[in-house]
Image: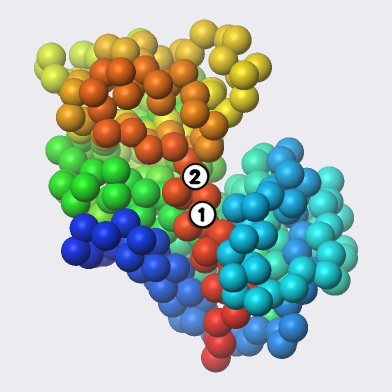
Amino acid sequence: MTDRQVILLHGGAGAATMHSAVAHCVGEVRDTPDTRPTTSPAVIAGIGTTATHALRGRLLLDPLARQGIEVVDTLAFPDPSALFADSRWELALVLSPWKQEVATQLDTLTVSATRTGVVDTIVRYADGVIGVNTNSWAAQAAMETVMGGRAPASILVLGSGGSSNSVALGCRRAWPTARLIGSARNTSALEAWAGRFEAEATAPDDIRGLFDGTAPSLIVNTTTWGETDASETEPFVFDFPELLAPGNSYFDLNNRISTLQTTALQAGMNVMSGTFMQRATNACRVALLTARIS
């Protein structure tokens, strides 16, 4: 596997990075045969533990309003079967824990969705539905921005769930030759992840010894530790402070300002929460509703 380098950050402008991510995401759908948009997108669905909140949140509603899209209804479903049984929606948000399972149930996927085995968005067209991975483009835009245009020598990804795959693909597009390391408690999922992206896999207790007294240039937390107050009541499986160094970068996919983010800031790190990524993801979703695909 060899990735062609695709850089989203141009001229140091974070906003332009988001626009570039959207353009690439829409371009993948345009490259998928026989996809034609419906003419009046208005009903948005969702599945996942936070679907009800996401469908009503400003991070989604604001970009829809800016594009003049009137949402006449939002539909939260308990599982993929219920989602696919209902034909009223034009766009569906796929949230944890369904992103990988849904990818196996769709016949048409974009390149990024195929590569990662992850679908976070489904768009309904006149000829059917297509599974899209917007997260890989959004995560890449976020990582390039928090790195400030610099290329990391090493990237450490914490966690082995669906989001870790989207992050890894973004890393491989932006920095194909960077050292990419993953760590998680789920050994089988981690090994599969490492094989998919030509990365290294290591147990949480063995991370520190990989860097010869230095620290990873970029750390990415894809776990849900820090997503809520309750999540932080359990010990974090990684020895996080030992991985930090002033001037290096930390990206946390969780929108909440967590203990991990505060700790990284106190260590002098460049820190980004998941809000930028979420805004980029929703910008991609809105673009998919409005773009003319032919």
Which numbered dot is residue 222? none
Colour setup of the view:
rainbow
Whether residue 191 appears in this view of the structure is no
Q: Is residue 13 above or below residue 255?
A: below
- The residue drawn where x is 49% and y is 44% is 275
Name the residue beneath numbered marker 2. Answer: 275
Task: Work out whether residue 57 can be spotted.
Answer: yes
Residue 240: image location, x then y, percent: 35, 15
How far across and down, in percent of the image, does residue 245 sit?
Answer: 20, 21
Q: Which mark is residue 279?
A: 1
Give 53 or 155, whichever is nearer the viewer: 53
Disc 2 to disc 1, how far (Cα)? 6 Å
- In the image, is 106 to the left or to the right of 164? right
Q: Label 1 is placed on what type of residue?
A: Arg
Residue 39 appears left or right of 144: right
Residue drawn at the location 37% of the way across and 49% of the way down: 142
- Viewer-proximal residue, 212 or 39? 39
Residue at 62 percent across and 19 percent down: it is 229
Q: Tell me the quadrant of the picture where the N terminus can be found.
A: bottom left
Question: In the image, 40: left or right of 222?
Answer: right
Q: Nearer the viewer, residue 99 or 43?
A: 43
Tag 2 secondary structure: helix
Is residue 282 placed above or below 276 in the rendered structure? below
Relative to 66, say whether 121 is above or below: above
170 to the left or right of 134: left
Q: Quadrant of the C terminus?
A: bottom right
Structural crowding at the residue carrying mark 2, measured as other residues with C-alpha within 10 Å and reported as few (<14), some (14–19) or many (≥20): some
Callout 2 amino acid: Thr
CB-based contact (under 8 Å), mark 2 and mark 1: yes
Image point 60% across, 10% down: which residue?
233
Q: Secondary structure at mark 1?
A: helix
